[in-house]
Amino acid sequence: RYFGVGNTKIYVEKMCEFFSRISETKFTAIRHSNIYGAHDKFDLERSHVFGATVTKVMTATDKISVWGTGEEERDLLHADDLNRFVEAAIEKQTEKYRLYNCGLGKAVTIKDLVNKIIRASGKTLKVEHDLSQPTIKTSLFLDCSLAESELGWKPEVGLDQGIQRTIDWWAENIDPATLKPKS
């Protein structure tokens, strides 16, 4: 599944590069890390690790279950920083085609992420690791130095601040019984 998606993304980047050479249109390809924040997917069927963990924490009373060992590491970027990146690229990109990385630029273990989300929620929860679920020990984070040098962009929302903003938004906007927006 991911192999096909990855190849499609590379194909689209190459097409943008090609069309930038034969037209007057400017193209920006963005390889961003895992995006999170308000309006994320919080249902457990479609969400990624951040949204699923927020939902598990916000609906739990005594414990949560986390897939795998928690040793995997992810680069997480708040949606506000991605929005600022897009604005910077529109305003400051001078090349007709450019490929940028856009992320926080450092990785956090899933275990640490879960603990940070629990702390931000104000709850006291036990964390159980479901080792029957998939775990692939990976450490993924992006080098965003090109975006900083060419666009003057760097992330402004730290992970702890972004987690707290998201928890606050979730509590105000999501119905814990249905996991849908409150009416």
Image: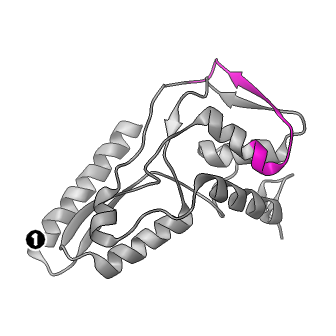
- Crowding near the residue tagged with mark 1, few <14, some 14–19, many ≥20 C-alpha atoms within 10 Å: few
Horizontal side, residue 22 vs residue 33: left or right: left
Task: Tell me which residue sits at (60%, 35%) in the image.
Answer: 110
Is residue 54 located in the magenta-colored stretch of the structure?
no
Compared with 132, 25 (above or below) is below
Q: Which quarter of the rendered picture does the N terminus lie within? A: top left
On the question of residue 44 being in view, the answer is no
Residue 75 spot, x, y in % from top left: 48, 46
Foreground residue, 147 or 3? 147
What residue is shown with label 1?
21
On the question of residue 81 being in view, the answer is yes
Q: Which quarter of the rendered picture does the C terminus lie within? A: bottom right
Task: Tell me which residue sits at (31%, 52%) in the image.
Answer: 9
- Marker count (numbered): 1
Task: Tell me which residue sits at (70%, 23%) in the image.
Answer: 129
| Residue stretch in magenta | 118-134
Q: Quadrant of residue 135?
A: top right
